[in-house]
Image: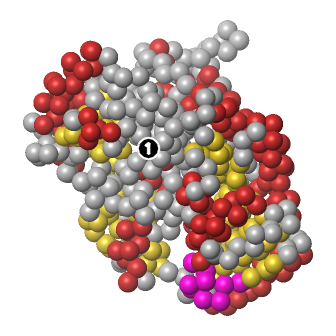
Amino acid sequence: MRMPEPDRAIIARRAEVVSGLEALVAPGSVISDRTGLRVYETDGLTAYRQVPMAVVLPANTDEVSTVLRFCHDRGIKVVPRGGGTSLSGGALPLADGIVLSAAKLNRVLEIDLANQCAVVQPGVTNLAITDAVSDAGYYYAPDPSSQIACTIGGNVAENAGGVHCLKYGLTTNNLLGLEAVLITGEVIRIGGKHFDSEAYDLLGIITGSEGLLCVVTEATVRLLRKPQAVQAVLAAFPDNTQAGDCVARIIGAGLIPAGMEMMDGPAIAAAEAFCHAGYPLDAGALLIVEVDGSAQDVLVGIARVKEIATACGATEVRASRSEDERLVFWSGRKNAFPAIGRISPDYYVMDGTIPRRRLSEMLRLISELSAQSGLRIANVFHAGDGNLHPMIMYDSAVPGELERTEALGAEILKACVRMGGVLTGEHGVGIEKRDLMDVMFDAVDLDHQQRLKCAFDADGLLNPGKVFPVLHRCAELGRLHVHHGQVPFPDLPRF
């Protein structure tokens, strides 16, 4: 869905903004022609498009600082952008704002194996970190399916995960330090190579803040030694209920697999047609369970997983016999999104999280909602941590079908909250879930979150229009909440 064209006031201002930016960065680092701007008009969500006023590509921290100061002083809105793979509209541009791209900030600055970390710029792709240290026997654990294209700056903004986040955590669990620039141009450093900080957890606040607080210019990430052994089990089940029960029993047995992914029948069929991974097409559900560690740990863990899967009614249980076969097992799951793209004109990827024990219940509900809407849904899950990725198939050329798709997605996310889950697991809120935030948070919660936004960006210039359904002026948020006629903690100073 294309947004409205910019009005005359925006067009008039563009020339002034472009001229000012061109004076701050190297020649060729500002894009303002219509054709060049089209490249940046959307992100991975793709249902919405908006051409920005301009795009600037700073080459270092000083240039980022200068650009942000320029924008702050003139009240220009700024949308930070990494690889543009966001699936929640997090990098969707604004007609009256600029896009600040990290494309030129793409260097691995330091590899420090003694401290098991690397220092990288935000435009470095996720997979490039592992490629840089693989020969030394190390890797970077978070592995989103888009890891070949998504960047570390975007991973920090969205707190990205991946198929191995069950054991190794999300970006926040693998991040040691940041250099970032505030909207005023001030450069700050948080954390470093040390394990933890003695002060407030600003690193935790910025990670997952979706570009609303600052622009990351450098990240210090944790590196892990490659495990001695790794093996995966492919287990097929007649239906989703048995596969969901198997997930619960594996975790209940005290096993923490490196990854545990689930796919339903439609996702299996699409992935097999795309990757030829050897998935059984008669299966109603499929689990991929990976165990890593010492050779003995893997031997025992794989045997236990196979035993539990069989007891849960698996019709086929197959352990990888080589590294190549393990990668084939994963190929279908990691390519599930493009696989769906081959069988549907458009698809809408959802992202919600529920307690693991309610996986089967949620799958039944999704099936019912799909039937009621007349829209097909294929499901893939980070099953071990209850993170769902239903893919709703639709055709944007059919009038009203996008709106029906959005309504169906909203019902799925509302159900996640009702089941004790949350609106997002790793894709972020962006614009996709923005208007559902009050399903999970009341007005007081949202106001306090906006107070934090105001502490970093008082004028609301960084990535406005994302996350918050109603953005209040910071002066309005200065008032304390009064409950039943009483101001809480009257002895404390007011904002």
Residue found 31% across the figure and 72% down from its top: 111
Looking at the rendered structure, the number of numbered marks drawn on it comes to 1
Residue found 79% across the figure and 51% down from its top: 363
Q: Residues within 10 Å of mark 1 (few under 14, many from 20)?
A: many
Q: Splitting the image into 4 quarters, where does residue 193 fall?
A: bottom left
Considering depth in this image, is 222 or 289 the residue closer to the camera? 289
Does the magenta segment cover residue 86? Answer: no
Q: Amino acid at mark 1?
A: Asp
| 221 with respect to 279 (left or right) | left
Instruction: Point out residue 305 in the picture as x, y percentages from the top left corner.
Output: 77, 78
Q: Splitting the image into 4 quarters, where does residue 488 fall?
A: top right
Instruction: Point out residue 454 in the picture as x, y percentages from the top left corner.
Output: 41, 27
Does the magenta segment cover residue 325? Answer: yes
Considering depth in this image, is 469 or 83 the residue closer to the camera? 83
Please say whether residue 384 is visible from this viewpoint: no
Determine the secondary structure under disc 1.
loop
| 76 with respect to 168 (left or right) | left
Instruction: Point out residue 394 in the picture as x, y percentages from the top left corner.
Output: 63, 42
Residue segment shown in magenta: 319-327
When the figure is inspected, residue 23 is found, relative to residue 263, above or below; the finding is above
For label 1, the residue is 43
- Residue at the far top: name it: 485
Residue found 70% across the figure and 64% down from its top: 268
| 104 with respect to 268 (left or right) | left
When the figure is inspected, residue 193 is found, relative to residue 17, above or below; the finding is below
When the figure is inspected, residue 343 is found, relative to residue 12, above or below; the finding is below
Residue found 53% across the figure and 21% down from its top: 470
